[in-house]
Image (cartoon, grey):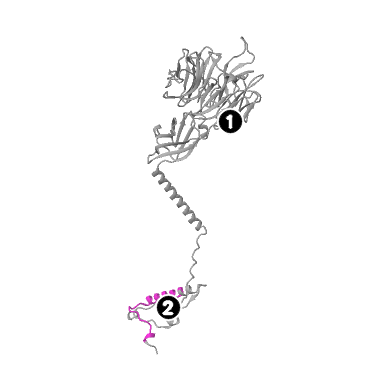
Amino acid sequence: MSTDDERPEVPAVPRTRAEMRAAREAAEREAATAEVRAAPAAPELVQPAAAEASAPEPVPPAAAEVPDTAPPITKPAFVPAPAPAPKAPRNRRFLLALGAVLGILVLVGAGLGAVSLTQGPRITEVQVDPAEAIETSGSRVILTANQSLAAIDESQVTVEPSAPFTLDAAGRGIGIRFTVPLDDDTKYTVSVADAVGAGGGPSATLTTSFTTPASNIFLLRRDVDKKDTIFRTDLTGESAVPVFAAGKINDFRATSSQLVVSVEEDEGSKLIVMRRDGTDQRELELPGEGYVGAIQVSDRGGLVGYSYSDKELSDTEGRASVLVTQSLTGDDDPVITEVGGEEANIFVWQFVPDSAAVLFIDFDGALSLVDRSSDAGVQSLGLATTIQGVSRGTYTAIVERLDGTVVELDLTDGSEQPLAASDPDYGTATTITPFPGGTLRHVVARSESGIPSGQAIVKVNDKGAATPLVEVGPTDSILQACASPSGQYAAVVIAPDLADNPYDQMLLPLPENMETHLVDLRSGDELVALTGFDASWCQTAPQF
């Protein structure tokens, strides 16, 4: 006998047969799904529970009036097992890593862009050749910024220690050109203040530094018993190295990369070009068989010039003291200087520093200028007796006119002004050698009878203040004084004990014993005295 607990639960709300069937089917589906989840295997047929099949369904009173035309569902329900979850793609990790890297790059780029916008321009590259800077005028420091810049004015640029310069700036580049050579063994700092990007934004100071190397100097040592030798040394004289030797070396000159040597032989002169270490020697073609003297070089123009005379020379035949120029490469023929369509006999001449121009005086006393880099022809500059020197970076020559006055001649426009006397005034100078910042003047003291009683090299700065550098007594003689390219040092050639110091028998005869004294022009202190002469700092050879 059943109890109340065993009776089927009577719904609180009467349901129709259709509702009851829908509820039963939902219960069957839920039970089937639970079994499949508990034991996932092949799909199985789920039969209705026996109790539910035999139990009479309660029929509400209203249902009796409505005939049930839908028979009970006895068809089993098929419930498939759930499909397995799809596996993640094999390259998911790669995609995630790639996305992370790209994200980092975006962040870095954005950060750099923000830094650029907040910090202003920066230097990305610096170009400079410190070794060339102490040898020649016109060396450059080129700064490259990370962005195009607004216009830069010279007032924004400073160089420490001070050095004259010109400015050429465009786009991202700033070029500072030094108009004179720089000091050796010196740290230079170049700054550009208030640099602003072309598109605006904050300003910045662009700064770079470089250190120039210590100087070397070349000297010629003649030996009447052995070979003459050109050697290179530092300014202490403790590291002398021979670079070229020959039986008779008449003269030589040096560029920033080459040596040009005049060798004297029985059949005439030879002109040999080589590297500064003496290697890669090659002979230049001369206008003929003859003799070469007064050689000079134009580093900027890549030229060598010299005075040439034929070996076979008479009153009616042959060339005497003609001025010849040609390329240091030897790729062209020698060019003889002409005035008025005729070869000119030259008394004295000099290259204009930092150019391919030649300043010369012919045997008639005419002072002329000709530029080998153009076809402008010969420019007449009046009459003169000698050329003392030409200043680096200024195109100003110091010449002596026929009336004995010494003038500073501007070679660009022909204007001139008298050379100011020194303070104190040491009298008339026999030679005047310009250097950046002043001149070196060779003066001779004489007794009342006119006999030399002493000689001196006096440094005179641009304001006229004079300071004696080297002094000798009446037994010695000063043959030459010249300055280093920047005007930092001086080389003074002295022939000691001249009465017992015989001249050699060379084409350029000079005393056999000569000394070169190196002096610091800033302090006036002597650095060292070296055996030899014809210092490579000098533009011309010493005169006897």
Q: Which residues are magenta?
A: 4-33
Cα–Cα gap, marks 1 and 2: 123 Å
Res 376 seen here: no
Using the image as rendered, state which of residue 413 and residue 131 is in the foreground: 131
Residue 311 place in picture, x, y as percent: 64, 15
Using the image as rendered, state which of residue 78 and residue 331 is in the foreground: 331
* Mark closer to the observer (1, 2): 1
Q: Which quadrant, please, contains the C terminus?
A: top right
- Number of marks: 2
In the figure, residue 60 lies in which quadrant?
Answer: bottom left
Using the image as rendered, state which of residue 63 and residue 514 is in the foreground: 514
- The residue where tag 2 is placed is 72
Label 1 packing within 10 angstroms: few (<14), some (14-19), many (20+):
many
Which secondary structure, mark 2? loop
CB atoms of marks 1 and 2 within 8 Å = no
Label 2 packing within 10 angstroms: few (<14), some (14-19), many (20+):
few
Magenta span main SS: helix
The stretch drawn in magenta includes residue 9: yes
Please, what is the three-letter code of the amino acid marked with disc 2? Pro
- The residue where tag 1 is placed is 232
Please, what is the three-letter code of the amino acid marked with disc 1? Arg
Which secondary structure, mark 1? strand
Mark closest to the chain's N terminus, 1 or 2: 2
Residue 212 place in picture, x, y as percent: 50, 35
Q: Is residue 18 left or right of residue 218?
A: left
